[in-house]
Amino acid sequence: MTNSIAIDTNFLIDIVIDRDTSRKSIAKLNQALHEFETIFVPFHTIVEFIYVLENIRQFEGLEKLSKAEIIEKVFAIYSTPHFEVENIVVLLSALDLYKTHKIGDAIIAATIVENDIRVILSNDKHFAKINRLKVY
């Protein structure tokens, strides 16, 4: 990617959650947007972002967020101009599954389905609830 900069999980958290470092991060982001064409958001950064938001009460002492609120924050990142999220097709599919599954399982299922695999070798029966997937 030409003229791009990547973004880290804690930086994203600073942007969406009001913390002591938020103003500094937002100013830094605005500066980067003038200097770089694209803000690259690695897939793993989004996964960590979701995990931190799921556990925000434990980490930050804030009110627990619902899955719908977390999904809304991920969509806000995805729809931010100049932000390019890695593996967006898998992420969108995983977010749909995340409504009824844990994020890790949603990502596993979305990834294998996106790779045209329809059977998973697992002892976890909850994968059988995903209609595009069969448990071996």
Image (cartoon, rainbow, N blue to C red):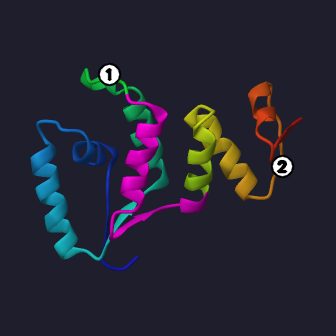
Residue 25 appears in the figure? yes
Residue 87 part of the magenta segment: yes
What's the amino acid at mark 1? Arg
The x and y percentages for residue 123 are 80, 25
Residue under label 1: 57
What's the amino acid at mark 2? Arg
Q: Secondary structure at mark 1?
A: helix
Q: Secondary structure at mark 2?
A: loop
Viewer-side residue, 44 vs 133: 133
Horizontally, residue 74 falls left or right of residue 129, namely left
**Circle 2: is it few (<14), some (14-19), or many (20+) Cα within 10 Å?**
some
The x and y percentages for residue 80 are 34, 63
Residue at the spot x=41%, y=76% of the render? 1
Horizontally, residue 90 falls left or right of residue 70, namely right
Numbered label attached to residue 118: 2
Residue at the spot x=32%, y=22% of the render? 57
Residue 45 appears in the figure? no
Residue at the spot x=36%, y=24% of the render? 64
Q: Which residues are magenta?
A: 65-89
Residue 109 part of the magenta segment: no
**Circle 1: is it few (<14), some (14-19), or many (20+) Cα within 10 Å?**
few
Rendered position, 12 above or below 17: below
